[in-house]
């Protein structure tokens, strides 16, 4: 994958995902190393759709991991999460309160509760990865 030209926001997300979730527990697209999905979850006692992207820094990110390390972040899931959150807060502070993270030591996970916020988050994540090359 050419991360210098990454545009995750260009992924075609069907308009009827909520309908698809009535028949399947998850809607997802695999775009290695990224996994993009929507599920219906319980949040604060309410059922709502959760949109997420996750990836493992150990999978096919050697060059980008080196660039991340040059910027002072560990090239693991925690370092990626820190970098991405700092990028969001610094460059898109109004979006920061609508973008959540829930990763672990091996996996980076970011999620939102609306398709519009999710599309915006994919754009921000793509931009932040391309920014590593600058």
Image (cartoon, rainbow, N blue to C red):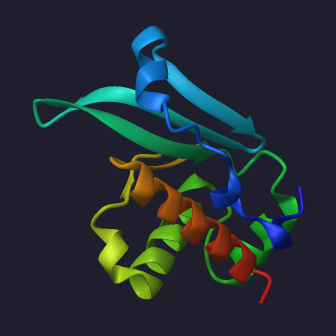
Q: Is residue 79 above or below residue 61?
A: below
Provide residue 111's location: percent of width, then percent of height.
Answer: 42, 49
Provide residue 15's location: percent of width, then percent of height.
Answer: 51, 38
Please report the residue visible at 40 percent of the width from the left and 59 percent of the height from the top: 117
Provide residue 32's location: percent of width, then percent of height.
Answer: 78, 42
Q: Quadrant of the image for the C terminus?
A: bottom right
Q: Residue furthest front?
A: 15
Q: Residue furthest bottom?
A: 134
Residue 105 in view (yes/no): no
Please report the residue visible at 70 percent of the width from the left and 82 percent of the height from the top: 131
Q: Residue furthest left?
A: 45
Q: How many marks?
A: 0
In this view, the residue in front, 96 or 71, is: 96
Q: Is residue 113 above or below residue 17?
A: below
In this view, the residue in front, 84 or 121, is: 121
Provide residue 75's location: percent of width, then percent of height.
Answer: 68, 63
Q: Is residue 108 above or below residue 46?
A: below
Q: Quadrant of residue 33?
A: top right
Please report the residue visible at 45 percent of the width from the left and 70 percent of the height from the top: 85
Q: Quadrant of residue 54?
A: top right
Q: Residue furthest top?
A: 23
Please report the residue visible at 50 percent of the width from the left and 22 percent of the height from the top: 26
In this view, the residue in front, 44 or 67, is: 44
Q: Quadrant of the image for the N terminus?
A: bottom right
């Amino acid at each position: 994958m050419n991360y210098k030209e990454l545009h995750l926001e260009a992924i075609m997300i069907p308009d009827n995902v909520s309908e698809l979730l009535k028949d399947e527990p998850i809607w997802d697209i695999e775009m290695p190393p990224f996994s993009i999905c929507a599920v219906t979850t319980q949040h604060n006692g309410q059922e709502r759709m959760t949109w997420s992207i996750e990836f493992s820094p150990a999978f096919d990110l050697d060059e980008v991991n080196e660039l991340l390390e040059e910027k002072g972040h560990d090239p693991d899931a925690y370092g990626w999460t820190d970098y991405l959150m700092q990028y969001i807060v610094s460059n898109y502070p109004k979006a920061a309160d609508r973008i959540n993270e829930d990763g672990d030591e091996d996996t980076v996970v970011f999620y939102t509760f609306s398709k519009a916020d999710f599309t915006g988050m994919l754009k921000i994540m793509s931009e932040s990865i391309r920014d590593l090359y600058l």
